[in-house]
Image (cartoon, rainbow, N blue to C red):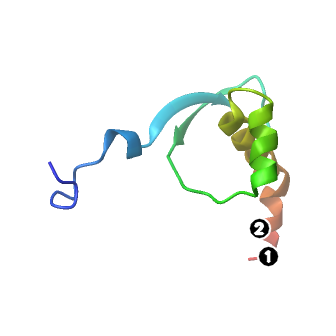
Amino acid sequence: MDSRMNKEFVQEWDAPSVVETAAASAPKANVVALKQIVTIRLDTDMLEWFKSNGPGYQTRINQILRQYMADHRDDGAANR
């Protein structure tokens, strides 16, 4: 089946998946989050550094971005 012909069809690998994760502001609380496959351009040296620490580099990048978001959440509200 061609996904371009049926707008309701979603490739399995492209569909957001539900995972349980700890919220950055509440480490002991479980929160249901959606994950979606994206394409992002990163500096080669930075990506290699994350990969050099073993499997799970994408999760580590996500955790760092989540912490940054939590730390700067109020910054966006002040600029509106």
Q: CA distance from mark 2 to mark 1?
A: 5 Å
Q: Which residue is mark 2?
A: 76
Which disc number belongs to residue 15? none
Residue 29: x and y in percent read: 70, 25
Residue in the picture at 81% in, 60% down: 74
Pointer 1: what residue?
79
Splitting the image into 4 quarters, where does residue 61 fall? Answer: top right
The answer, for residue 24, to whether it is visible in the render is: no
The amino acid type of the residue labelled 2 equals: Gly
Q: Position of residue 30 (x, y in %)?
A: 65, 25
Q: What residue do we see at 68% from left, 35% from top? A: 59
Quadrant where the C terminus sits is bottom right
Q: Residue furthest bottom?
A: 80
Indicate the quadrant where residue 66 lies: top right
Q: Residues within 10 Å of mark 2 (few under 14, many from 20)?
A: few
Would residue 55 be found to the left or right of residue 37 on screen?
right
Question: Is residue 29 visible in this depiction of the protein?
Answer: yes
Between 41 and 35, the residue placed more toward the observer is 41
**55 on left or right of 76:** left
Q: Amino acid at mark 1?
A: Asn
Residue visible at 78% across and 57% down?
73
Secondary structure of the residue carrying numbered label 1: loop
Check whether the beta carbons of the residues at disc 2 and disc 1 lie within 8 A of each other: yes
